[in-house]
Image (cartoon, rainbow, N blue to C red):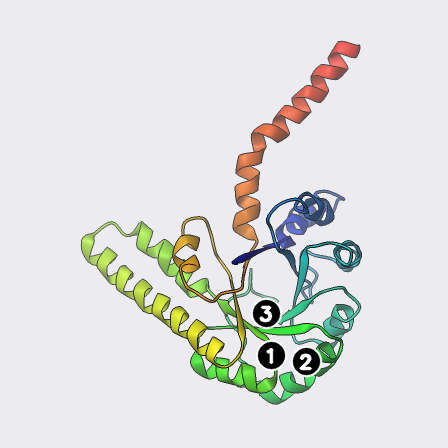
Amino acid sequence: MKELYVNVDHIATLREARKTFEPSPLALVKLLEDTAVAGITTHLREDRRHIQDYDIYELSQYLGNSRLGFAFEMAASKDIRAIALRTSADICTIVPENRNEVTTEGGLDVIAQAEYLKEFIKPILDSGKKVSFFIEPALDQIVMAQSVGANYIEIHTGRFTNLHKFHSLRTSDVERDAAANLLKIEYEHIKQAVIYARGHHLKVNMGHGLTLDNLPDIAKIDNVDQYHIGHSIISTALIHGIKNASAEFINTLNKVAQEA
């Protein structure tokens, strides 16, 4: 069964834009309890640009008694690890982090940090949590992820999703054919990475830039456990929910007017 994990970071991004109390990531999570969503993803960044420590505390407390899984994305930072170890997260996904980036721009270089990562993840594994590395669909990175001790890899689908969008915007046949060829190559890289990872006894997740337009192709790849999607789900929810939300406010105004 293919599982969807909803990343709630962008709920906090909207809240932090005004430094107010809404929208609440926890409120959204509670709404997902009776859906087919399998779990929740958060990324507590070192610069705290969206999810805050108190969000993690609230979400951890709630998810510890929920059927929903809890994936905790994090840089390979000892300070963040200390927080992760105090949560009810089932899986900790180690991602690269650059404070100047808008969002995560690529996969973790496990090869370059192998010795550090091997020691870094030991306390996480000892706590009973699973470890995943967020990496490019590169076979040498997969081998090293398994060697270092990861249970999962999460394939960074950003290049595929960018090429998918690029292809859809091409206007001439020549440009479309060239874009289609690049897209096919990247798709094959991802397929082979999944097969290779499974052969090395790693479970496989995917994430980054997945939308309703590009997800159908990615979802055709077998042996993927989880899909971690955030921005596009929140964006879609805003579009589809605007009528209901506006109606709630109009109903409130009408009710007050009738009582006046």
Report the residue marked by disc 2: 121
Q: Secondary structure at mark 2?
A: loop
| Among numbered discs 2 and 3, the one appearing first in the sequence | 3
Direction left: furthest residue: 174
Label 1 to label 2, Cα distance in Å?
Answer: 8 Å
Picture quadrant of residue 21: top right
Q: Position of residue 161 (x, y in %)?
A: 42, 59
| Among numbered discs 1 and 3, the one appearing first in the sequence | 3
Disc 1 marks a residue whose amino acid type is: Ala
Which residue does the image show at 73% across and 71% down from the upper left?
Answer: 80
Whether label 1 touches label 3, CB < 8 Å: no
Whether label 2 touches label 3, CB < 8 Å: no
Question: Considering only vertical position in the picture, is 112 above or below 246?
Answer: below
Q: Position of residue 24 (x, y in %)?
A: 72, 46
Badge 1 crowding class, 10 Å Cα cut-off, few under 14, some 14 to 19, many 20 or more, is many
Label 1 to label 3, Cα distance in Å?
Answer: 22 Å
Numbered mark located on residue 150 in the image: 1
Whether label 1 touches label 2, CB < 8 Å: yes
Report the residue marked by disc 3: 98
Total numbered labels? 3
- Discs 2/3, front: 2
* Near-viewer residue (253 or 206): 206
